[in-house]
Image: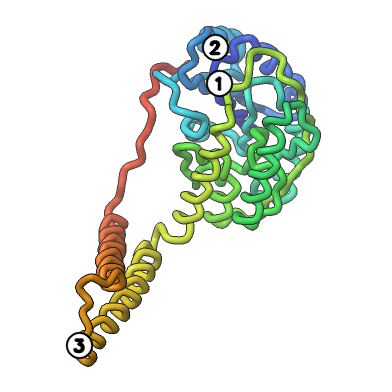
Amino acid sequence: MDVSIVIPVYNEEESLPELEKAIHEALNADFSYEIIFVDDGSTDNSWGVITSLSDKKDTVRGISFHHNYGKSVALQAGFEASEGKYVVTMDADLQDDPSEVPEMIQMLQNGYDLVSGWKKERHDPLSKTIPSKFFNYVTRKVARINLHDFNCGLKAYRAEVVENIYLYGELHRYIPMLAKREGYSRIAEKVVKHHPRKYGKTKFGFSRFMNGFLDLITITFVQRYLQKPMHFFGTVGVLLLLIGGGINFYMAFIKFFYGRGIGDRPLLFLGILLMVVGVQFFSTGLLGEMINKNHVEKQKPRIREKV
């Protein structure tokens, strides 16, 4: 199997037959391929369309969840089911163009680990494009990866890349960061065509950008301190203990050597507070180190059906 196309689906019944046809036209001549539709708890007839396509086409497979888990979990299920040498992800809404895939695979064959699409000319409203530009700018600076469009659903990977990352929550936006953390730093970008939405409506609102920034903070922290939580919490704890201890030493000095009353001075309470919080941070670091020694089993979705 040359290529596995992983496509998360949520209420996209009208788009799926056209998307399958477009993928066939783009890949059939040059590659052996499979399409893995992951129905993320759709409430329309998306799963019925997927099963119908699977009955007619040997290249189509499907996974259906009991309820909506989110795009990251859907992608992870598709990654685990994929059998291709290369894995491509795209959205189900026909805005990504399958004709871009052969060139992206060629770039992987030339040595890249990951190729990310860049929707340079977008057919989205300003309410979506302006926040997206700001989000991508901040992510680019924090991640130190020179990509213009972290949110683009059209990406291509060598199979070993997706085998060595694990997606949960909303981390699908940061797959390049996860890949780089695992040592897959040969990351390229390709300008891709972006089509207007043909059916239905977008599933993403403004809240995804807030969630995206929170996830960016999470993944940045995890990347730096997952294996060494004491380095963060312990450092902050010791710093607060030193400041609080210094304040309280000063209070004790003026009490015993100058006979001044300190019981009603706010500075005394600040020193005590800093020391208490410092102990809490230090204790959190110790607990983090203890938890880090134990293996936590990854949570998996309950798959309802496969075809």
Amino acid at pointer 3: Gly
Residue 253: x and y in percent read 25, 87
Which residue is tagged 2?
46
Marks 1 and 2, Cα distance to the nearest angstrom? 8 Å
Residue at 52 percent of width and 30 percent of height: 71
Q: Say left or right for 132 vs 274.
A: right
SS for tag 3?
loop
Q: Say left or right for 211 vs 252.
A: right
- Crowding around mark 2 (Cα neighbors within 10 Å: few <14, some 14 to 19, many 20+) is many
- Residue 248 higher or lower than 125, as above or below: below
Which residue is tagged 3?
259
Which residue is tagged 1?
9
Amino acid at pointer 1: Val
- Residue 278 higher or lower than 100, as above or below: below
Residue 2 in view: no
Q: Residue furthest bottom?
A: 257
- Crowding around mark 3 (Cα neighbors within 10 Å: few <14, some 14 to 19, many 20+) is few
SS for tag 1?
strand
Quadrant occupied by the N terminus: top right
- Whether tag 3 and tag 2 are in contact, CB under 8 A, the answer is no
Marks 3 and 2, Cα distance to the nearest angstrom? 80 Å
Amino acid at pointer 2: Ser
- Whether tag 3 and tag 1 are in contact, CB under 8 A, the answer is no
Task: State which quadrant residue 52 falls in.
Answer: top right
Name the foreground residue: 278 vs 68.
Answer: 278
Task: State which quadrant residue 185 falls in.
Answer: bottom right
Q: Counting residues from the N terminus, which is met first, the one under dot 1 or under dot 2?
A: 1
Name the foreground residue: 105 vs 145.
Answer: 145
Residue 48: x and y in percent read 52, 7
Residue at 67 percent of width and 17 percent of height: 20
Q: Counting residues from the N terminus, which is met first, the one under dot 3 or under dot 1?
A: 1
- Whether tag 1 and tag 2 are in contact, CB under 8 A, the answer is yes
